[in-house]
Amino acid sequence: MNISILGAGAMGSLFGGLLAQSGQQVTLLDINDAHLHAIRREGLRLETDNGDRRVSGLVACRPEQASGQPDLLLVFTKSQHTDSALRGIAGHIGAQTRVLTVQNGLGNAEALCRHVAPEQVLIGMTNWPADTVGPGHVRSHGQGMVRVWSADGVERPANAEVAAVLDGAGLNCAPDPEVWTSIWEKVAFNAALNSLCAVTGCTVGQLDGASEGVELARAIVLEVLAVAQSAGVATDTQRCLDSVAYAIAHHRTHQPSMLQDVLAGRSTEIGAINGEVLARARQAGVAVPHTATLLGLVRLIEARASGAVHE
C-alpha cells in the first residue's frame, strides 16, 4: 500500500517506520528539516522493545514536495494545525485516498471532512507510546493498540483493509465500530493528565505528590465521561480511572506532550481536548468545572508565552 504520513513527529515516525519495515511504501511529510535530512541520509533509527535498528526506504520530504496520491494518508499533526496542513497538500489527496486521523482530542473527524469527502475519512485511537530522541531517531517502549472505523459509522471494506495493514506492521490494530468509546476514554485520560501536568510542571508521576493531584485527575475523568455518556457514547469509568492510576504509578518521569509544548513556548492541543469537552458539555447541560478551569489556565499560559500578556 502507498501510504503518506502527515506529521512525522514521534508518533508519525513510529507508525511510518513500522509500516515501511512491514513492506509498505511510506512517505513521511513534515516541516522539521533536520529530522527529514537525517532520515534521508541515514534512515530512521527506531528503538522499540523489538530492538534498535535503522529503517531505510522511507521517502522523507516537506508537504509541498509530496507527489502522487497515496492509497492511505495518516494524519498525525497537532489538531490546531490540521486545517492548514491539509490545505497544503490538497493535491496529494485523490478520490480514492483514505484519510485516517488518530490525533488526540475531539473535532478531528469534522476537520478532515472539511477537506475530504466524508466517506473517505476514517477515525481512530492509538495509545502507543513514542518519543523523539533527536533528528531521525524515535523511541517507543511498551505496548499499545489502534482502533479504527469510518467517520460516518458505515461499515466499508476500507475499515478492515486499513486495520489489516496497520496490524501487519505490529501495531495491534483492529476495526471497531465502537471506536468512539476508545476516543472519549483517551480524551478523558489526556484532559486529566496533560492539562494538569501542563499547568503544574509536574511529570505524570509527580501528580501524586499531593492527594489533591490524584483527586483532580479523577474529577476530570468523571466530568469528561459524563459528557461522553450524554452524547450516547458508552464508556467504562473504572477502566479509565485505572488507566490514569497506572500511568501515575508507572510512568513516573513521563512529560506529556502538552507539558513539553508549554516548556517550549509552543501552542498546545488544549482546545481539541478540554476545549472541545467544554463546548459539548455546554450543549448538553453538563457541568465540567475542573475541566473548564484547566482549560482557562493553559490558555493563560499560552497567552503569556505568545506575548499577549503584558507587564
Image (cartoon, grey):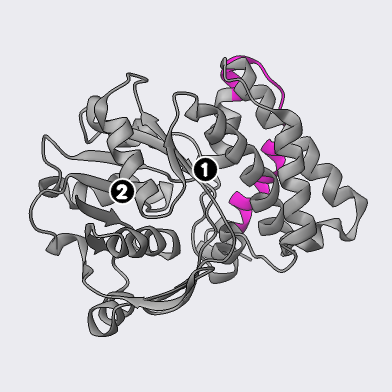
Q: Amino acid at mark 2?
A: Leu
Q: Where in the figure is residue 5, as x and y percent of width and height?
A: 28, 56
Q: Residue furthest left?
A: 68
**Mark 2 sits on what residue?**
74
The answer to whether residue 290 is seen in the rendering is: no
Q: Where in the figure is residue 238, as x and y percent of width and height?
A: 76, 32
Q: Amino acid at mark 1?
A: Gly
Residue at 47% across, 47% down: 172
Evaluate if marks 2 and 1 touch, with contact meaning CB atoms under 8 Å apart.
Answer: no
**Is 31 above or below relative to 83?**
below
Residue at 23% across, 31% down: 120
Q: Is residue 260 left or right of residue 170?
A: right
Give whichever of discs 2 and 1 has the lower sequence position: 2
The answer to whether residue 129 is seen in the rendering is: yes
Residue at 44% across, 24% down: 177
Element type where label 2 sits in the image = strand
Q: Toward the viewer: 112 or 249?
A: 249
C-alpha span from label 2 to label 1: 21 Å
**Mark 1 sits on what residue?**
271
* 297 drawn magenta: yes
Name the quarter where the C terminus is drawn: bottom right
Q: Is residue 127 left or right of residue 35?
A: right
Q: Main secondary structure of the magenta part?
A: helix
Q: Residue furthest right?
A: 211
Give the residues drawn in magenta, as a range: 281-301
* 120 drawn magenta: no
